[in-house]
Each structure stands twice: as C-alpha cells, then as structure tokens.
Image (spheres, rainbow, N blue to C red):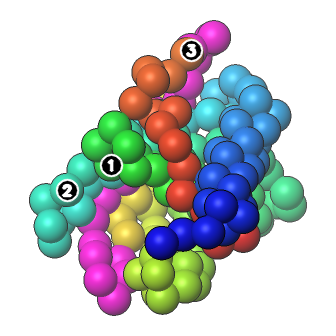
Amino acid sequence: MMRPLAAIVLIASMLCAGCTFERAWDAAGVAPEGGVAGQWEGIWKSDKSRSHGGLRCAIRQISPDTCEAYFHATHGVVFALNQQVNMRVWRADGDWQFSGSEDLGVMNGGLFEYNGHLHGDRFTATYRSPVDFGTFILTRVHGDVVSPPATRAATAPASH
C-alpha cells in the first residue's frame, strides 16, 4: 500500500511535468512559417505494437543548429508522457532536417533515437528504441488553437 506522503509526491511530480510542457507550449507560441520553432500538433504511431495517440510539440531554437523540443504524447484518455529533447537541425534541399537521441531511462524504453524533416507546415519523424519503433506526424499550429481535452490528460513524470 502506498503511503500518503509517497502518493502526494507522485501526484505532485505528475502535475509538475505537465506544467513544464504547458509553459514550453505557451512560450513557443505560434511562430512564423519557414522555421522550426513554434507549436506543432498531430499523432504518434507505433509500428511495433500498432498503438497510437495524440502528440504535441513545442520547439524553441536555442542555436543555429540546435532546437529544444518539448513533447507531450498521449495514449488513451489517461496516460501521457512529457519529454524534452535537444534536436540537431540543419537545412537540406530547402527543408529542415533533424536528428538526435535521448536516454529516457529503463522505465521509459531506454535509448530513444529519432530523425526526420520539416517541409512547410509538416513535421515527420521516425523513432526507434530497444522496445518500440514508429512515426510522428505533426502539423504547425496556426492561430489560437485549443487542444482537445484528451491531450491534456494526467501526466507521467518527465525524465528531465
């Protein structure tokens, strides 16, 4: 049985992880087209398990070749995961390309590797970890968009 203090700490850490994403989302705002920064919204799909869910991403350019990306992924109406990663970005053939890796820890699948590209208002990436592989498909958010309640579910603690 979970002790009351442990339950409070768990709930507080879940809420804090959600607050970190929401702050990043609000700070990213609706960025001008043509760059990487801004708010992105779409889906993730596992090619291994056929699972899928909602995905939001707030991207901030921190140097000419690095972006900080905050992801908020949902699965069903209850489970959500927030994760921050640094993406290496570069221009190639008129599109933005990106890649990177992040150790999400044993509980979240280990080493997570990804690469993809942004073409106009479309963000497409593939990911691979020791336990899963799949695709992210997002589009740039235009104007004042309010995400559906399912993407604002209770959140699991972030690794960072």
Identify the magenta region.
128-145
Label 3 sits on a secondary structure element that is loop
Amino acid type at mark 1: His
Other-residue count near label 2 (Cα within 10 Å), few / some / many at <14 / 14–19 / ≥20: few
Residue assigned mark 1: 75
Mark 2 and mark 3: Cα distance apart in space: 25 Å
Q: Horizontal and vertical percent for residue 121?
A: 49, 32
Tell me which numbered mark, 2 or 1, is placed earlier along the sequence.
2
Q: Is label 2 or label 3 in front?
A: 2
Label 1 sits on a secondary structure element that is strand
Residue visible at 81% across and 34% down in the picture: 27
Q: Kindly indicate the quadrant of the structure image that contains residue 125.
A: bottom left
Residue 109 is inside the magenta segment: no
Q: Horizontal and vertical percent for residue 77?
A: 34, 37
Other-residue count near label 3 (Cα within 10 Å), few / some / many at <14 / 14–19 / ≥20: few
Amino acid type at mark 2: Ser
Q: Nearer the viewer, residue 56 or 89?
A: 56
Q: Horizontal and vertical percent for residue 47?
A: 17, 65
